[in-house]
Amino acid sequence: MDKDVFVGLDIGTTKVACIISALGENNELKVVGVGKSASYGLRKGVVVDIEKTVKSIEDAVKEAEQMSGVDVEDVWVGIAGDHIKARNSTGSVGIAHEDHEIRQEDIDRAVDVAKTVQIPQEYEPLHIIPQEFNVDELKGIKHPLGMIGVRLTTQVHIITGQGTIIQNITKCVEKAGLRLNKLVFESLASSYAVLDRDEKELGVALIDIGGGTSDIAIYCGENIRHTAVVGLGGESVTRDISVGLKTPLDKAEEIKKLHGCAYLPLLRGDERLMVPMTGGRDDREIDRSGLVGVIEPRVEEILDIVLREIKKTEYVDMLGAGVVLTGGGAQMKGMVEKAESVLKMPVRIGFPKSFGGLTDMVKSPMFATGVGLCMFAAESSAAESLRSGGKKKSSSGESGYRRAINKVTSWFSKNF
C-alpha cells in the first residue's frame, strides 16, 4: 500500500466504516474510497463476537477497496467504550547541556517522566499527549525546542484502555487480514475532522454520540485537556422506541431515522406516523409527539450525564466556543436545540471538512471518526518521518516519507 495512502477504520457498535484517503498533487488529503457495513459483534464499543466483527470489518473494507482500487493492508482503528480512562500527569527534567539549549531528547525525557504514573495493571496506554511545557518560570509554552533553560516541565494527557478489550479489537483486525497501525480514541480522531483551531483555542467540548457510547473531548488553548466516555448512545434511544412503541428493533431504528426528533417544540400539531407492531399485529397510527415523548427523555439523560462530566473539570467556564455534536446520534432533528437547552451553551453539529475527493459521501457526522482517523494517520506519519529524518528512500531516490511530510505539513498549515 502506498505510503501516501491512509486508511481509517471506525469499528462501532452499530456500523463499521472504512475510509481510504490519499495525498493529492495539490497537497490535500482526498477521500478515494468509502465502505460501510452493519456491525453485529460489538456492544457499547466492546467486542462480544469475534467472528461477526471480523465479517463486518471485511465487508466495509471490501466495499472501500472496490470503490478506490486500493488494496488495504494497514489501518488506523478507532476505539471507544466506557472502559476508556484518562488523566493528566506532570514530568520535569533538568537541562544538562553546557549551552542549556532544549533539545528533542530533553522533551522526550520530560514526557517519559510524566508518563511514569501508576496505571492499573489491566489497562494499557493508548495516547500520551503533551499539552504544554514550562521552561523555568515561563509557562504555557507549546514548542520549547531550541529555547534556553535550566529546567523543563511538561503536562501530558494520558488515555488508557482495558488490555483485554484492546487485544480483542486487535485480534479482529488481524483476522480480517489487516495490519493495525494504531488504535485511536474515537473522539480524539473525530476532533481532527470537525473542530477548528479557533474553537480549540477558545475552549470547546466535542461530544461524539455513537451507537453504544457518547465520547467527550475538551479542548482549551489548542490542547486536549479532558476526555471521558458515557455508556449511552443512539442504540439506547432505539431500544426505548422499541419498548415504548412495541415495535421490533430494526423497525425502531428506521422510525428513529425517518421521524425521530429530540425537541418537542419543533413539532407541528398534526404530525402522525404508522408504527409496525410486534407479533404480526396490525400497524397502528400514532401522533409523532408520542415518538418524541420516548426519545427526548433519553437524549436529555445522555446530555445531563455529559454536563455532569464537564462540570467535574476546571474548564466548564472556559468553553468559549461552546459544544460541537458529532457522530451518528447527532444527526437527529432537534439535537442542537435540545443540547442548548440542557447544556446552556451554544451548540453546532460537526461535519467532516477540509477534505477533497469524495466529500459528498462522507459529509455526515457518522463519518467524523473515520475521516478523522485518516487525518490523524497523515499527521502522525509525517511527525514520525520528521523524527526519523525521512531516511527511507523510494525507487526514484526521493524519500517517500519526506514527500508525505511536505504534503501533510503544507496541508495542515493551510487548513488548521
Image (cartoon, rainbow, N blue to C red):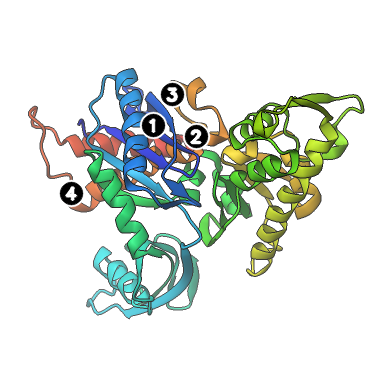
Residue wearing tag 2: 367
- Quadrant for residue 372, please give it: top left
Q: CA distance from mark 2 to mark 4?
A: 33 Å
At label 2, which amino acid type do we have?
Phe
Instruction: Point out the residue furthest to the right here.
Output: 269
Which callout, 3 or 2, points at the residue further toward the start of the chain? 3
Q: CA distance from mark 1 to mark 4?
A: 28 Å
- Quadrant for residue 337, please give it: top right
- Give me the residue at 23% from left, 53% from top: 387
Q: Position of residue 390 (x, y in %)?
A: 17, 44
- Mark 3 or 2, closer to the camera: 2
Q: Are marks 3 and 1 in contact (CB under 8 Å)?
A: no
Residue wearing tag 3: 356
Q: Are marks 1 and 4 in contact (CB under 8 Å)?
A: no
Q: Are marks 2 and 4 in contact (CB under 8 Å)?
A: no
Residue wearing tag 4: 389
Q: CA distance from mark 3 to mark 1?
A: 13 Å
